[in-house]
């Protein structure tokens, strides 16, 4: 494996020599080492799962991974099928690169209705519901502002947009500097003895080392839900909790929801919230830093009130710096961090990675962090909260030189080899094996809000 893959494994505190990788090729390709990121982050989750298995059973399973399968998992939404047809388009009409005054570029994001409305309000155009008309109105409005002015105007009203920057410009920006650091930051200042033991288990199903453990999944969009579906495939009972009145994209949930139950709960409902926390083993938080403090769901409060909980948090831009409280998505981080510049077309138009790799890679690292902490807890060792950020994953990706086709051949992945079906829905199965057995989801995605806010 390369340096980036080794860093992913080291970030999770697991050894790099035990992962056996086959089907090596440039399945995803591109200007940056996305294939290596896929192998490294999926491998980190598998290695951490093996560490948990060893802590609970005394046996450390051998782990193996097809690089082709990892690449397909990074593009799983593109290969999902419902009744034989692809899922819907990934981005709304007002989620796009736009040319700005002075010739620069910006990226907008309006997949969710409230973000689209904020974008239109900031830039002074009307949303009509007609994709072509809305796209044209956005393009016209963007042309009247510089990229920096557009970025600030949209963020000021709670919308989502960024100006394109080069890697050098982003590294010099205070937000870019704040996002630099380890792939996983462990809050050692909050490390504490595990307050509750984890039961040992037999080796009846080695590919489900998290069997009997509960994960409270307070995440949305892609990275956090990818972590939750990974833990569900490894045996955990995962309960996704959404707030009332906040919409989710149906096809997005179809891809990231298998194996979980899904409920709706106002986190201000203290008795139900605290019951869920008391019964959980892992808490995944994917809201902006500070957004859940009023519910005492920050790392400090959780360590004090629920010291048995493994706590992993995700943000777009990192928990420090001037952009900590800003909304962000994979596509925005790619443009702000300089990835879009590195992937630019010959005519200078900004480009993209061949997958939403920041979301996917960070999601697998979130799962790895949770599994490593569970292994520590099972061994009776202190546990510490962990935090990750899309912008930090971007910094590590962009700092790594990509392989050349001369080093590895280019391949075309075969999705049919790795599909799993739940009724009319076909998805890419969880990648990897433990002692030759693949992880698996016990069921397909459940309807959003269809389950009770309680443990099964």
Image (cartoon, grey):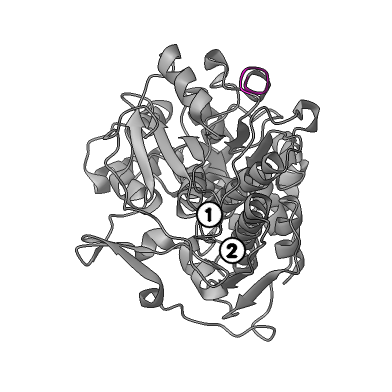
Does the image show residue 218? no
> Residue 360 has which mark?
1
Label 2 residue SS = helix
Q: Which residues are magenta?
A: 302-306
Residue 50 at what x, y percent from top left?
Answer: 64, 58
- In terms of image quadrants, where is residue 39? bottom right
Magenta-colored stretch includes residue 319: no
Which residue is found at the position 40% from the left and 28% from the top? 118
Label 1 residue SS = helix
344 sits to left or right of 7: left
Residue 75 at what x, y percent from top left?
Answer: 45, 63
- Relative vertical location of residue 14 with respect to residue 23 in this rendering, above or below: above
For disc 1, the neighbor class at 10 Å (few under 14, some 14 to 19, many from 20) is many
Which residue is found at the position 63% from the left and 41% from the top? 389
Does the image show residue 273? yes
Q: Main secondary structure of the magenta part?
A: helix
């Amino acid at each position: 494996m390369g340096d980036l893959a080794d860093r992913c494994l080291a970030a999770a505190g697991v050894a790099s020599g035990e992962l056996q990788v086959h089907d090596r090729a440039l399945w995803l390709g591109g200007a940056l080492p996305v294939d290596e990121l896929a192998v490294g982050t999926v491998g980190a989750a598998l290695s951490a799962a093996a560490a948990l298995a060893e802590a609970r059973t005394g046996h450390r399973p051998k782990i193996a991974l097809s690089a082709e399968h990892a690449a397909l998992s990074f593009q799983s939404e593109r290969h999902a099928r419902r009744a034989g047809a692809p899922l819907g388009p990934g981005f709304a009409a007002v989620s796009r690169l736009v040319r700005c005054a002075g010739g620069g570029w910006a990226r907008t994001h309006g997949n969710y209705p409230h973000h689209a409305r904020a974008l239109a309000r900031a830039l002074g155009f009307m949303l009509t519901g007609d994709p072509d008309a809305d796209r044209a109105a956005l393009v016209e409005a963007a042309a009247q502002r510089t990229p920096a002015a557009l970025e600030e105007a949209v963020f000021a009203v709670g919308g989502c947009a960024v100006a394109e920057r080069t890697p050098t410009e982003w590294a010099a920006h205070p937000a870019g500097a704040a996002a630099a650091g380890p792939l996983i930051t462990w809050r050692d200042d909050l490390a504490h003895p595990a307050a509750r033991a984890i039961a040992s288990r037999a080796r009846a199903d080695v590919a489900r080392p998290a069997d009997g453990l509960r994960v409270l999944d307070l995440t949305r969009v892609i990275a956090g839900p990818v972590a939750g579906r990974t833990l569900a495939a490894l045996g955990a009972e995962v309960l996704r909790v959404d707030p009332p009145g906040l919409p989710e994209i149906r096809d997005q949930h179809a891809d990231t929801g298998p194996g979980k139950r899904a409920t709706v709960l106002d986190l201000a409902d203290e008795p139900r919230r605290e019951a869920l926390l008391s019964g959980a083993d892992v808490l995944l938080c994917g809201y902006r830093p500070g957004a859940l403090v009023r519910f005492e769901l920050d790392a400090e409060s959780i360590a004090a009130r629920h010291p048995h909980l493994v706590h992993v948090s995700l943000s777009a831009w990192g928990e420090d710096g001037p952009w900590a409280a800003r909304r962000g998505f994979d596509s925005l981080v790619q443009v702000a961090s300089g990835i879009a510049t590195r992937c630019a077309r010959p005519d200078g138009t900004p480009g993209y990675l061949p997958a939403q790799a920041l979301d996917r890679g960070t999601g697998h690292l979130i799962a790895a962090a949770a599994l490593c902490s569970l292994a520590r807890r099972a061994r009776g060792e202190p546990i510490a909260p962990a935090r990750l950020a899309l912008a930090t994953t971007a910094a590590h990706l962009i700092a790594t030189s990509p392989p050349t086709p001369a080093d590895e051949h280019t391949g075309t992945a075969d999705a049919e080899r790795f599909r799993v079906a739940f009724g009319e829905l076909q998805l890419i199965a969880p990648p990897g094996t433990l002692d030759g057995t693949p992880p698996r989801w016990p069921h397909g995605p459940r309807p959003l809000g269809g389950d009770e806010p309680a443990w099964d």
